Image: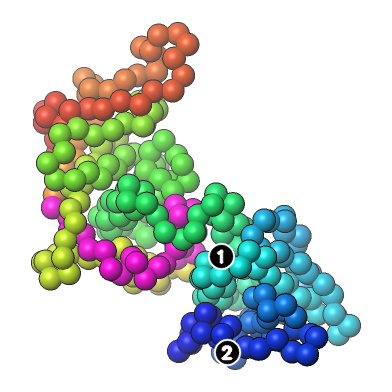
């Protein structure tokens, strides 16, 4: 889209004499986006549209407002109110511009922008500053690696739709006829953690426990990759399907993943994938067998006890 980042563009702008200043983001973009600064120097992104935008709930970090102009057009304005989140706001604005680039018309494009912003709003309200912790990052990498393996079988759209881990579902992947729970562990680990009874106690259809052994690596190690490499690789696979691409972006954001330079500096390597059929006799807790009054359960399973169930 641009040779310069939003960060660089904002640095180049200067507030006007007692008024805000705006500059078109991209003449080739189907939507009329403008980057701007208000009279106090606070950063803004403005979308000019022919349609009245739906109202957006107020947030603590970013102020959103809309207004009708004298020419009949509407403005949708995103304004940063917490300067310490400047870098995250830049990423948000770049994301709003890029995820709406392939929209069919102004009305659908405006809807995409608002839906995408609401995803970001949830992320910011959780206090996320854009960088996942080690545990969450490794878990997300494992799910994305497994996603690559199921796309050839189920197809792009069904695979992305069935990826439910970022949405907080009990299983990471729920297909119409099967489910998969993905666990990412370090080589040498002897057990895996099951975070709830419902994670493996699924009624109605069968599933698998998939264990990925993920290790830290150097950039020169064969098979090594960065989190950013993996995201770009998957985007390349699904880019032909616009619906799936939008859902993929949404689920990354829901999981807390925002593209950061740090994700280009961390290298991982997949050592092994093991798959275990969760069938009769599998070592797991079942809700029906728990004593009355037990509500939440978290437990560990020895990997050595699963060998008889390995696929």
Residue 180 position within the rendered picture, expressed as x and y whole percent measured from the top left: 31, 40
Residue drawn at the location 46% of the way across and 41% of the way down: 168
Between 139 and 158, the one nearer to me in the picture: 139
Disc sitting over residue 12 in the figure: 2
Between 11 and 134, the one nearer to me in the picture: 11
Please indicate whether residue 262 sits to the left or right of residue 38 in the image.
left
Residue 104 seen in render: yes
Q: In which quarter of the image is residue 235?
A: bottom left
Furthest toward the top, the residue is 292
Q: Name the residue under label 1.
A: 85
Residue drawn at the location 47% of the way across and 69% of the way down: 242
Residue 76 position within the rendered picture, expressed as x and y whole percent measured from the top left: 73, 72
Badge 1 element: helix
Residue 4 position within the rendered picture, expressed as x and y whole percent measured from the top left: 48, 87
Furthest toward the right, the residue is 70
Q: Quadrant of residue 245?
A: bottom left
Please indicate whether residue 148 sits to the left or right of residue 309 in the image.
right
In reply to whether residue 260 is colored magenta, the answer given is yes
Please indicate whether residue 251 sits to the left or right of residue 230 in the image.
right
Question: How far apart are labels 1 and 2 at the CA level?
Answer: 19 Å
Numbered range of the magenta stretch: 243-271
Badge 2 element: helix
Q: Looking at the image, is 87 positioned above or below residue 2?
A: above
């Amino acid at each position: 889209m641009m040779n310069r980042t939003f960060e660089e563009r904002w640095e180049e702008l200067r507030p006007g004499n007692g008024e805000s200043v705006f500059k078109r983001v991209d003449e080739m973009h189907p939507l009329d986006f403008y980057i701007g600064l208000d009279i106090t120097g606070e950063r803004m992104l403005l979308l000019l549209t022919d349609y009245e935008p739906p109202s957006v709930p107020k947030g603590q970090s970013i102020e959103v407002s809309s207004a009708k102009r004298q020419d009949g057009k509407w403005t949708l304005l995103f304004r940063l109110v917490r300067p310490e989140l400047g870098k995250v706001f830049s990423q948000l604005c770049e994301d709003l511009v890029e995820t709406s680039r392939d929209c069919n018309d102004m009305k659908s494009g405006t809807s995409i922008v608002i839906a995408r912003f609401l995803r970001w709003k949830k992320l910011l309200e959780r206090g996320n500053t854009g960088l996942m912790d080690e545990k969450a990052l490794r878990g997300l990498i494992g799910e994305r690696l497994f996603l690559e393996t199921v796309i050839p079988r189920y197809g792009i759209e069904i695979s992305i739709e069935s990826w439910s881990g970022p949405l907080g579902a009990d299983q990471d992947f729920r297909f119409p006829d099967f489910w998969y729970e993905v666990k990412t562990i370090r080589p040498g680990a002897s057990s895996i953690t099951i975070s709830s009874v419902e994670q493996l106690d699924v009624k109605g259809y069968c599933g698998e426990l998939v264990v990925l052994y993920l290790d830290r690596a150097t950039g020169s190690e064969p098979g090594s990759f960065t989190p950013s490499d993996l995201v770009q690789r998957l985007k390349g696979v699904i880019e032909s399907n616009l619906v799936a691409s939008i859902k993929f972006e949404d689920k990354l954001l829901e999981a807390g993943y925002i593209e950061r330079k740090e994700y280009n500096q961390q290298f991982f390597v997949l050592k092994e994938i093991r798959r275990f059929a969760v069938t009769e006799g599998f070592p797991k807790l079942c809700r029906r067998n728990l004593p009355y009054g037990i509500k939440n359960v978290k437990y560990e399973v020895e990997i050595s006890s699963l060998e008889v169930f390995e696929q």
